[in-house]
């Protein structure tokens, strides 16, 4: 039997068997020699045997309990971050086979973690190289377009095409920058520099960024919330997230529309909401809007590249926050971000 492979179990069974044999022998001798009060002595021997067997079982299971507690402590330490721990498995039996498999699993997890770390390092370096390689040609193309526009002031057709080219270059630059930001967040290549920030000031910065566009399109950004609300965040990245939500709202709001940025502080969270009274989102699209490059078949936005909302979501989650969306077709959309204080 496999259960008897373990020497401690064999010792336990052997000891119990020895106790039973000793009791049987003593009982046989008492009966055979017709000892006076043999029944009383037999009962005493039976009680002593029972106590001995219970003591043996108690000692065995107490030792097993200590072994299990030690293994649990090692596993807990591993989960706490110490990747060097191992469970001692210097004996035979099913329990030690289990410990050996746990040690093998730990080794495999450590190898995967190391490979993932190396992959992230490689991705971070690759992103950095791509970023530098793309900035130079894009900047050069913008300069060339500026020169063409200066030289072709009297040629309306060339002016028109050069302006369209400039718009497309801006789109490419925006796409590249958003891709780089999302990939850096995915790779863990960005360390958020958190500090206590005033939400009102952040919202005001977002409003100023879109001031020219709102004036040109006849729209309005309204801010609402306490000027005293602060929480721990990375100011630049949070402005990026809120800005992407506001941009999305402006893209889907008609002239005269209003985008509201509201914030509230509760007992354990700070909640920031971006609302609009635009066209709303079709119900079938609600579960897909945070997917990269997703475009609704109903979308009238021909300039969007489908990275603004995924980037906002990645930034919020990097702050250990959550983002939710609620929309009514023809009645507007609301994005709600919740951050733990």
Image (tube, rainbow, N blue to C red):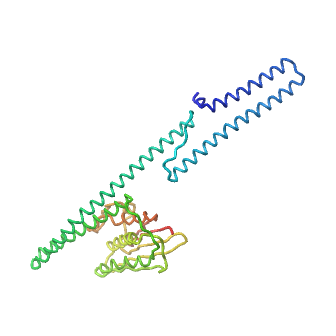
List x then y, in percent, for residue 88: 55, 40
| Residue 67 lies in quadrant | top right
Along the line of sight, which residue is nearer the eye, 229 or 325?
229
**Quadrant of residue 9 in the image?**
top right
Q: Name the spot of residue 227 as percent of width and height, x first.
A: 47, 80
In the figure, 286 relative to 252: above or below? above
Q: Is residue 109 left or right of residue 126?
A: right
Quadrant of the image containing the N terminus:
top right
Q: How many marks?
A: 0
Q: Where in the figure is residue 35, as x and y percent of width and height?
A: 88, 21
Image position of 3 with respect to 121: above or below: above
> In the current view of this chain or complex, which residue is farthest to the right?
36
Nearer-the-camera pick, 66 or 47? 66
Instruction: Pick out the residue farthest to the top.
Output: 32
Left or right of residue 328, residue 16 in this image: right
> Is residue 154 positioned above or below 62 on the image?
below
Left or right: 23 in relation to 176: right
Residue at the (82%, 20%) spot, across then down: 29
Camera-side residue of 284 and 310: 310
In x, y percent, where is residue 313?
40, 64
């Amino acid at each position: 039997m496999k259960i008897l492979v373990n020497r401690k179990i064999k010792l336990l069974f052997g000891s119990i068997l020895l106790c039973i044999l000793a009791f049987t022998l003593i009982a046989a001798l008492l009966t055979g020699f017709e000892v006076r009060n043999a029944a009383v002595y037999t009962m005493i021997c039976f009680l002593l045997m029972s106590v001995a067997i219970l003591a043996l079982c108690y000692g065995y299971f107490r030792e097993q309990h200590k072994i299990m507690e030690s293994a649990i402590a090692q596993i807990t330490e591993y989960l706490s971050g110490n990747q060097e721990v191992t469970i001692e498995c210097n004996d035979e039996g099913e329990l030690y086979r289990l410990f050996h498999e746990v040690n093998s699993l730990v080794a495999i997890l450590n190898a995967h973690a190391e490979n993932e770390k190396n992959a992230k390092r490689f991705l971070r370096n690759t992103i950095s190289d791509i970023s530098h390689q793309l900035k130079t040609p894009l900047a050069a193309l913008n300069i060339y377009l500026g020169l063409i526009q200066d030289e072709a002031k009297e040629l309306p057709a060339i002016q028109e095409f050069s302006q369209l080219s400039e718009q497309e270059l801006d789109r490419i630059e925006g796409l590249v920058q958003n891709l780089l930001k999302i990939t850096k967040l995915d790779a863990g290549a960005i360390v958020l520099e958190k500090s206590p920030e005033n939400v009102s000031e952040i919202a005001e910065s977002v409003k100023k960024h879109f001031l020219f566009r709102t004036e040109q399109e006849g729209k309005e950004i309204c801010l609402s919330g306490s000027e005293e609300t602060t929480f721990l965040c990375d100011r630049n990245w949070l402005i990026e997230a809120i800005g992407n939500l506001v941009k999305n709202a402006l893209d889907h709001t008609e002239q005269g529309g209003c985008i509201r940025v509201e914030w509230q502080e509760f007992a354990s969270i700070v909640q920031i909401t971006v609302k609009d009274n635009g066209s709303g989102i079709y119900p079938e699209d609600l579960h897909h809007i945070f997917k990269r490059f997703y475009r609704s078949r109903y979308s009238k936005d021909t300039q969007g590249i489908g990275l603004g909302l995924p980037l906002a979501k990645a930034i919020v989650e990097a702050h250990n926050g959550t983002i939710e969306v609620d929309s009514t077709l023809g009645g507007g959309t609301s994005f709600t971000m919740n951050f733990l204080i």
